[in-house]
Amino acid sequence: MIMRRRSRWLAAVSLAGLSLSVSAASAETLAEAIAMAYASNPTLQAQRAQLRALDENWYQARAGYRPTLSASARATWSETTIPRTDPLVDIESNSGSAVLSLNQPIYTGGRVSSAVSAAEADSLSGREGLRRVEAQVLGQVIQSYVDVRRDQEALRIRQTNVAVLQRQLDESRARFEVGEITRTDVAQSEARLAAAVALLNSAQATLATSRAIYEAVVGQAPGDLAAEPPIGALLPGSIEQAWDLAESGSPVVRAAEYAEQASRARVAGARAEQMPTVSLQGQLGYSGLASPLHTDAYSRALSGAAVVTVPIFTGGQTLSRVRAATERNTVDRLGVENARRTVRQNITQSWSALQAARSNIDATDKQVRAARIAAEGVVQEQRVGLRTTIDVLNAEQELRAAELAQISARRDEYVAAAGVLGQVGRLQAGYLVPEIPRYDPAANFNSLRVTWGWTPWEVPISGVDGVLVPKPVVIPDRPVPLPPAPRSAPEDTPAQK
């Protein structure tokens, strides 16, 4: 029974080691994982498509400056029967007509210009939304990457623990057979080994889960992952500097500011409903008999008009729209301040987590060194009879716990650093992997400026129509000079290597 159980334990250890050796055949770096997710992650791709759809709103609003041309044709036939006549009177008639109508807005009181400004601000806000989603996706890539590395190392530690406890059990049985120790010592070794195997199984399941998350985010299963590169050079030197970076770089704050600009333009659009409109209208029509059809006999009518429309009374509806738009703009103005406070809070939390993780790294490094010395000393003392089996088992358990705490602290530091970068707006592919081709969110918007439907006279019309309309202001990204990182990512420990 004991031999069969031992065989199962050794088989579990061997299979786990085999899984790691197979995955080592496809080593990859964090930069490669980021590049793959940046190019293929469905969440990021969907957000880009959503931004392109949002850009079309600007094009549709801009069409309000352009002429509209419509054509209609009509053919009618009628038959009139007059009763009580002899002979019966039956009158038939038919007619045909075709009309071509043209309408060119000249001045809309700012209605079209307000819609254009609001749509442009919405597009700018959408770009910041894309930056926010990109930061979220890259943060997931980084976290899943370091999680897999942590869990791979944890599995290796668990495998080492099982191997050490197996040797300890073999030694305990040998010493029991010669009468040096009691059956209790053997039972203690067996219990610790069984617990270690259970923890090994849990570590395998945890690693499988981390690998599945990595595959979902990156797009392929992880292999033997290389050590993550240091990102300390991108981090601000202090929490105050992080707050300054977030003021101009946080996608959450910038999106809220652009949303406020859009609602401010919509206030101007609501007020423009009170203004007169001017347009030019022209119509060309032909009419005659539909049957028999002789177009050369059709009469032609050509007309043109300049139409001025002045709203006089709308029952208070226009003023109500102005008040509603003003209140919505107030909500967006308060939303900017709320976004600043939220980002400031998140930066404080991420910065505190980063500092705590750095302190934990120092503490766990010392803990591992001390626990390793203690474990080696207890083993030597046991051999001369100064320590018992349970002392050796406890020392080994404390060493493994220290090693696990060490790799968790390193993982926590890297994730916390990525969290700080995400809050200040620097968790972007351009900062992390500058050499990869980047998606330009402004390219699609710029391509819509001169496309099908564009007319050269819409430029002066938009200039006149938008005199009183606020234009969206592009928020500059004011980079804050960053000092050298106070601490770079730590190297792998000898145990991890």
Image: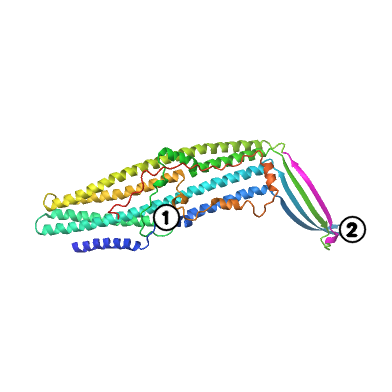
Left or right side of 131 for 172: left
What amino acid type is highlighted by mark number 2? Thr
Say if residue 1 shows up in the picture. Answer: no
**Crowd around label 2: few <14 · some 14–19 · many ≥20 (10 Å):** few
Residue that extends furthest to the left in the rendered view of this protein: 179
State whether residue 308 is above or below residue 34: above
Crowd rating for badge 1 (residues with CA inside 10 Å; few <14, some 14–19, many 20+): some
Image quadrant in which the C terminus is located: bottom left
Of circles 1 and 2, the one toward us is 1
Relative depth, front residue between 279 and 494: 494
Secondary structure type for disc 1: helix
Residue 338, percent across and down? 49, 38
Disc number at residue 85?
Answer: 2
- What span is in magenta? 295-310
Q: Nearer the viewer, residue 481 or 74?
A: 481
Classify residue 14 as left or right of residue 91.
left
Give the residue type that dot 1 points to: Ala
Q: Residue at x 26, y 45 (%)?
A: 366
Inter-mark Cα distance, 1 to 2: 97 Å
Mark 1 / mark 2, whichever is N-terminal: 1
Q: Give the quadrant of residue 167.
A: bottom left
Question: Quarter holding the N terminus?
Answer: bottom left
| Residue 109 shown in magenta | no
Look at the numbered disc 2 and give the secondary structure of its residue.
loop
Task: Please provide percent x and percent y for residue 446.
Answer: 59, 51
Q: Main secondary structure of the magenta part?
A: strand
Q: Is residue 170 visible?
A: yes
- Mark linked to residue 31: 1
